[in-house]
Amino acid sequence: MSSRRIPGTGAAKTVRRNGNNVRQLREDQLLTKAELARKAGISALTLSRIEGGHECRVDTKRKIILALGLTPSDRAKVFGARRGRT
């Protein structure tokens, strides 16, 4: 985990980050963030945060996967392997 300073508060916020391929897959399909967000039914801000490595809910992951024209079984291709599994 990393921490970053929240401007004006003097506090640090812990941000959990993960690696994913959402940005690369979106760019491969020549989609803008706004286009993919609209297709997925999520906000462009949410998509931006996810591309930046923030965690998201399972239903949001499903929406993104389907909007990219993939199937839920392609989850690992988009979001990587599950943590804690061998």
Image: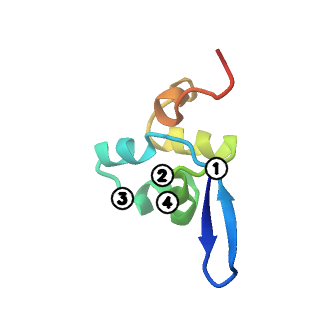
Residue beneath label 4, please?
Answer: 48
The residue under label 4 is which amino acid type? Ser
Pointers 4 and 2 in contact (C-beta within 8 Å): yes
Query: Which badge, 1 or 2, is on the more N-terminal residue?
Result: 1
Specify the farthest residue to the top. Answer: 86
- The crowd level at tag 3 (other Cα within 10 Å; few <14, some 14-19, many 20+) is few
The residue under label 1 is which amino acid type? Arg
Pointers 1 and 4 in contact (C-beta within 8 Å): no
Query: Which badge, 1 or 3, is on the more N-terminal residue?
Result: 1
Camera-side residue: 15 or 65?
15
Query: What residue is drawn where x is 56% and y is 43%?
Result: 18
Closest to the camera, between mark 1 and mark 2, is 1
Residue beneath label 1, please?
Answer: 16
Q: Quadrant of residue 21?
A: top left
- The circle drawn on residue 32 is 3
The residue under label 3 is which amino acid type? Thr
Q: Quadrant of residue 83?
A: top right
The answer to whether residue 18 is left or right of residue 51 is: right
* Location of residue 62 in the rendering, given as x and y in whole percent from the top left corner: 60, 39
Residue beneath label 2, please?
Answer: 51
Closest to the camera, between mark 3 and mark 2, is 2
Q: CA distance from mark 1 to mark 4?
A: 15 Å
